[in-house]
Image (cartoon, grey):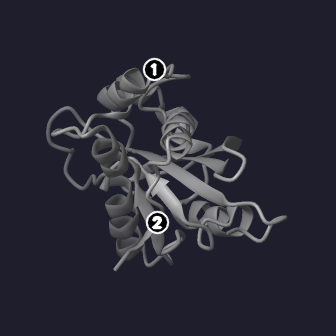
Amino acid sequence: MDSIAGRDLRCVIDVEATCWEDEPPPGSVGEITAIGLTVVDLGALERVSPHRIPVRPARSAVSAFCTALTGLTQAEVDTGVGFGEACRILAAEHGAGARPWTSWGDCDRHRFTRQCRATGTPYPLGRRRTNAKAAFTQARGLRRRPGTAGALRMAGLPLEGRHHRGGDDAWNIAALVLSLARGDAWPGPTAIP
């Protein structure tokens, strides 16, 4: 439980990263370009606040494919902060290291782990996490794990904002988390090794 007035606050995280339709150009790597975060209060069953942190990639550029998918442009990410500063903001301003967190699947967790390791940046997220995609799949008795847009349709929830945009995706994943919590199907966090 979060120490702020006894509230049960969690961070829902979704990242966007440089990507290409085919292979990356020589020397380029997939780097986080935006971190979306929505704080949810599981006790009150509400989304508390959305946040978006644009991140300036150090070793790659935003491709036309990436812009078409996410809407992010090179000019936009050029105004962002460096990855290390983005991680500091997550921890210091949003309590991301102290709170349990969730993401849709394992991709974002792995991306943070890889980029932190590659840059020598301290891991900014807590060690207690829930895979919302796995929780949704189990609660619905599904054989295949759906993407966020498909899960929203199954749950009868609207897709708000732009799909594949970190801040909007975190907001939508938070709606799915709350839908599961309302149905007593939210499993809570597990420890990350």
Toward the viewer: 48 or 22?
Answer: 48
Toward the viewer: 94 or 155?
Answer: 155
Tell me the element at label 1. loop
**Residue 118 position (above or below residue 143):** below
**Residue found 73% across the figure and 62% down from its top:** 93
Report if residue 170 is visible in the image: yes
Q: Which mark is residue 156?
A: 1
Locate the N terminus and report the quarter of the image it occupies: bottom right
- Picture quarter containing residue 75? top right
Q: Is residue 148 left or right of residue 74?
A: left
In the rendered structure, which amino acid carries the disc numbered 1? Gly
**Residue 112 position (above or below residue 43):** below
Q: Which mark is residue 189?
A: 2
Which residue, as the protein is rendered here, is positioned at the far right? 5
In the rendered structure, which amino acid carries the disc numbered 2? Pro
**Residue found 48% across the figure and 33% down from its top:** 165
Crowding at dot 1, Cα within 10 Å, few <14 / some 14-19 / many 20+, comes out as few
